[in-house]
Amino acid sequence: MNIKQYRQTRVLVTIFIGTIVSFAVTKNSYVMAVIGVLTGMLFLVLARSRTKITIDEREKTIREKAAQATYAIFAPTIAIGAFLLLIPSHSRLSVFAKGEFAYLESLGMVFAYLTLFLIAIYAISYHFLNKKYGGRDEE
């Protein structure tokens, strides 16, 4: 199977999954929706394993730059969001003191933990990849 056939197969499977999920939601059968999604994912994994996909250096560089840009944008954005959501609960503003927006503090805590998790994953992966590709320990 070449890349063109794989892309066509992926579109057909996506349409199949969308149809099954929409039918399952209208019938209130969430189990069928989950099974449809899992079946489609399994089929795509099997189809991809039979496809010969080669990546050149240009595409690899583009992926690396995209990952760096995503991290550089997402980590500070989610951290600022966490900070802004946690400020009202500690300043005891009248609107937030009534408990009407109590979920904002929980959402801020989730964002804060996600930020810490993202930074930890980055640090760990950087450490291991640096060792793997011959980086020095002095950095």
Image (tube, grey):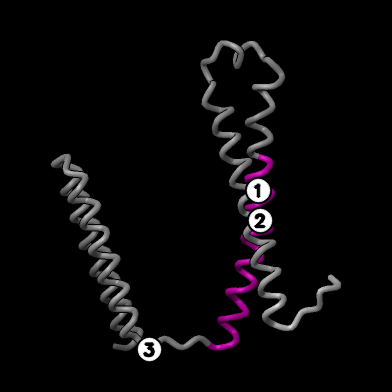
Q: CA distance from mark 3 to mark 1?
A: 37 Å
Q: CA distance from mark 2 to mark 3?
A: 34 Å
What is the quadrant of residue 50 in the picture?
bottom left
The mark lying in front, picked from 3 and 1, is 1
- Residue 128 rendering spot, x and y as whole percentages: 67, 72
Do the numbered discs 3 and 1 sit on residues whose CB atoms are within 8 Å?
no
SS class, disc 2: helix
Q: Give the amino acid at mark 1.
A: Leu
**Residue under label 1:** 116
- Residue 79 rendering spot, x and y as whole percentages: 67, 43
Do the numbered discs 2 and 1 sit on residues whose CB atoms are within 8 Å?
yes
- Residue 65 rendering spot, x and y as whole percentages: 65, 71
Q: Which mark is residue 52?
A: 3
Q: Is residue 128 left or right of residue 23?
A: right
Q: Which mark is residue 8?
A: none
Characterize the local packing of mark 1: few (<14), some (14-19) or many (20 or more) Cα atoms within 10 angstroms: some
As for residue 57 lying within the magenta part, the answer is yes
**Residue under label 2:** 120
Q: Give the amino acid at mark 3.
A: Lys
- Which part of the image, by quadrant, shows the N terminus? bottom left
N-terminal of the pair, mark 2 or mark 3, is: 3
As for residue 25 lying within the magenta part, the answer is no
Give the answer, above or below, for where 48 lies relative to 116: below
Q: Is residue 100 left or right of residue 43?
A: right
- Residue 80 rendering spot, x and y as whole percentages: 68, 41
What is the quadrant of residue 97 in the picture?
top right
What are the residue bounds of the magenta stretch?
56-80
For image coordinates 63% across by 45% down, the residue present is: 78
For image coordinates 55% across by 30% down, the residue present is: 106
